[in-house]
Amino acid sequence: MTVSAAIPQAVRADVETLWDYHNMHHDVRPSDIGIGLGSHDLGVATYAADLYMQGMFPLIVFTGANAPTTVSRFPRGEAVEYREHAIARGVPDGAVLVEPKATNTGENFTYTRALLAERGLSVSSAVLISRPYQQRRAYATCKKLWPEIEVICASHPLSLDDYVESIGDVDRVINMLVGDTQRITEYPKKGFAVEQPYPDKVHTAFERLVSAGYKDRLI
C-alpha cells in the first residue's frame, strides 16, 4: 500500500478538514518551558528535543503515565521514555523533568504545574508539544486550568500522509481525529476546557466520518 492510498479516498477530504482544524497554526517562539504531552507518538519527544536544541526553551517537562494504548509501547511510562529519547538526541540530562503520573490531558497540566511549583520554578509562557491532532484540545485544556500563561502549540511538522505513515495505522489516526473533535465540543460542557470555534464544515466532516464507522474514540 502506498502512502497516498493509505487514507481511503472516500473520506480523505473530511480527514484533511479535521487535520487542519486541530492544527493551531502557531509560530513557535522562545518561551519559558516546553511541555511534552505523553502519548503513543514518540514524535512528541523528537520535536521537543529539536526545539530545545534550537533554543526555544531552556527546560522540558515530559508528562504522562500510561494509557491502555501505550503500555506495551512504553512499559516504563510515556514521560520516562520520552525523556530518555530526548537525552539520546542531545538534550542535557538536567534540562528534562519528568511528571510520571498524569493519565489525561487535564492531569498533564495540573501535575506539571504542581511539579514546577515544588521546584520553585515560575513560568509565564510555554510551548505545548503534542500529537498534531491534539493541539487544539491541549490549548483549550491548558487555558482552562492554567489561564495565566501564554500558550504556543507545536507538533512534529509532518504532512498528514507522512504522519499516517509514521504511525503505521490509518484507522487509528482517523479514529483519534474524530474523537478529539468530539472532545472540543463536549469537554467545555464538563468544565474540562475552554470553548473553541467549531465551524460548520468541521461539524459536517465529523458527522460524515462517524457515519463511515470511525467511532472507536468517541466518548
Image (tube, grey):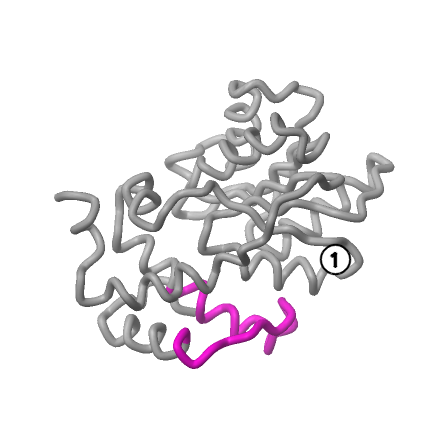
Residue 187 image offset from top left, x and y in percent: 56, 71
**In screen coordinates, is 197 left or right of 179?**
right
Mark 1: amino acid: Trp
Q: Secondary structure at mark 1?
A: loop
Residue positioned 33% across, 60% down in the render: 175
Magenta run includes residue 106: no
Q: Report x, y in % for residue 147.
A: 76, 61
Overall secondary structure of the magenta section: helix
Residue 105: x percent and y percent? 58, 54
Residues rendered magenta in the picture: 178-202
Q: Is residue 113 left or right of residue 39?
A: right
* In the rendered image, the vertical position of residue 198 relative to residue 22, given as above or below: below
Q: Is residue 130 above or below residue 216?
A: above
Q: Residue at x 35, y 44 (%)?
A: 163
Q: Nearer the viewer, residue 218 or 85?
A: 85
Residue 64 located left or right of residue 191: left
212 or 1, which lies in front?
1
Q: 10 Å neighbourhood of mark 1: few (<14), some, or many (≥20)? A: some
Quarter residue 180 falls in: bottom left
Task: Identify which residue is drawn at 24% across, 69% down.
Answer: 213
Q: Which residue is mark 1?
A: 146
Looking at the rendered image, the quarter that the N terminus falls into is: top left
